[in-house]
Amino acid sequence: MNRIENSPISKLHTMIVVLAMLLAAQIQYIQHGWINPDSVLYFESARLIAAGQWKEALHVWNWPLYPALIAAIHKVSGLGIQVSAQCLNVLFFGASALSFIQIIRLAGGRQLTMLAGALILFSSQYIVGDVLEMLMRDEGFWAFYLAGLVFFIRFYQHLRLRDALLWQLCAMIATLFRIEAIIYLILLPALFLFSGGFTIKERIRYFLTSHALNILLALALSLAIALHGDLSIKSFGRLQEVFTLNLYDELTHRLFTKAAIMSDEVLGKYLSEFAIQGLLLTFLYAIAAKTISATGFINLIMALFTVKNRNALLESKAYSALCCAALISLGNMALIITKVFVLSSRYAVGLAFILMIFASFQLASIMKNHDPAKTSRFKWLAMALIALMLLGLIKNILPKPEGYHYMQEAAAWVKANNTENRPVFSDDSRVRYYMGIAFVRSHGMNWKTVKHEMKSNRIQNYEFLLISHSVKHPEHEKVIADRLPQFKEIKRFNGIKSKKSIVIYRKIAECKTADCKTFDGKTIDSKATDGKATDGKTNQ
């Protein structure tokens, strides 16, 4: 432990950042080209930006910083769009790790605490194991959100104007990745108004200083709208989601609508008055569950112990700033779930970072405990925690299990076998991307797209159908069989544990005999195989 505590901090910083970038690169490597559904939108927008078609790009995705950065790397380096996004992902995670460790230092952590924080971050099953692999704007948000916290804590501690301006700049850039970052930009400076170490005049002064760029930008936007009659808040993309006169109605409309349904159809007349309270309790449970999922249960427990022992472990101003940011994160989650009745664990990552920073101090404290009466117990506890985290890290970098790339396998199979380039339909934007089919806007979720094509009868124009199925909706396969009898299953690719699958159907020409031959020589016998292609056995 003494060797670690005496090691140069700058070298430790560099080592952690390099390891973070190598980890991100390995995470991208084991994906073998796998992407998230949102990535298709970003890639198409980036392609259009690279081609100079900004208007069309904004139509695809109207918050364009992330696609623009992908396009810039693509143009400068000559790399493909997806590879450019992967490079950006590696850079962003390196920047996130740098700021994460810097916050630990600002909060009073030394070398051992920095290493503990790196281990907690790298072993995260959600942030690294699930989200980092996705080529999304979230990684850009992480990088600038954490950098913003670094500069805000510095400003709160040292009151330097440079830190105040850099905090606002980073928070603004974070907002251009994810709109909810604007809530931190607006509310975090309010910490000065409640700080006991300043006079009232100083509180107002530092509050305004930490909003200086915001005030200038707000004045500039107001002036632009006043001078140009064709401009309005709607002209500034997703800012209209925050700066709207109907904010309360937009936030509560769905809540009251769902509460009325719950009151009438679930609770009945004797309990109907508790509908809203019931929904709000459900929201609290969902927020808690998503926070635990994003943070990790062990990390959450260690964070709580750090809060309990904060006077001994944490620098007070850094602790206050992080607690304020944590409360804003909780508020963001509450607003999102109330407005749209959806809450991905990705929205809990801002809070998870703060809890993991707190957990780093408790882990370091356990690792260096010198109480002779407790040394043996703490030694074994420290070894167990380190072992668990190392196992988590190893799990994050191991190759993906069989079935993970089932969509890519389905796309590759059709590309290899559709030698005559017959028309192909897929209900999933990722499969279309893997096949190199031109981008088209979908009509919603996968099955909704299929129903739309069947209703318009355009589905009859295709030779091959690649349809997504899942064990949750076995009735969808029956609908395909009933509504589209001329399409027969010829191949099936199953996902992990066969919970999801891509089924490939081919339009079978009218036959003169009982049996029909498919394009690859397999036999369709509706009586013997339920309409599935066979080569001595049914394809699975």
Image (spheres, rainbow, N blue to C red):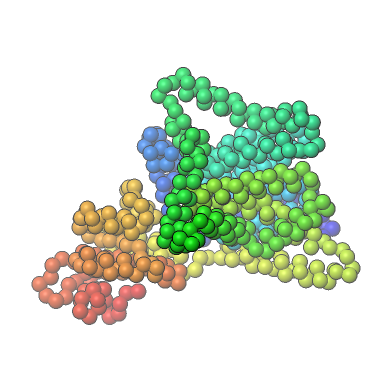
> Is any part of residue 131 visible from this angle?
no
- Residue at 84 percent across and 63 percent down: it is 369
The C terminus is located in which quarter? bottom left
Query: In the image as oriented, which residue stretches furthest toward the right?
Result: 372
- Residue 103, position in %: x, y? 71, 46
- Residue 381, position in %: x, y? 76, 69
Q: Nearer the viewer, residue 59 or 338?
A: 338
The reply, left or right, for residue 437 in relation to residue 379 is left
Q: Is residue 117 above or below residue 530?
A: above
Q: Nearer the viewer, residue 269 or 342?
A: 269
- Residue at 77 percent across and 56 percent down: it is 308
- Residue at 59 percent across and 40 percent down: it is 183
- Residue 357, position in %: x, y? 70, 53
Q: Nearer the viewer, residue 313 or 261?
A: 261
The reply, left or right, for residue 401 in relation to residue 501 is right
The N terminus is located in which quarter? bottom right
> Is any part of residue 255 visible from this angle?
yes
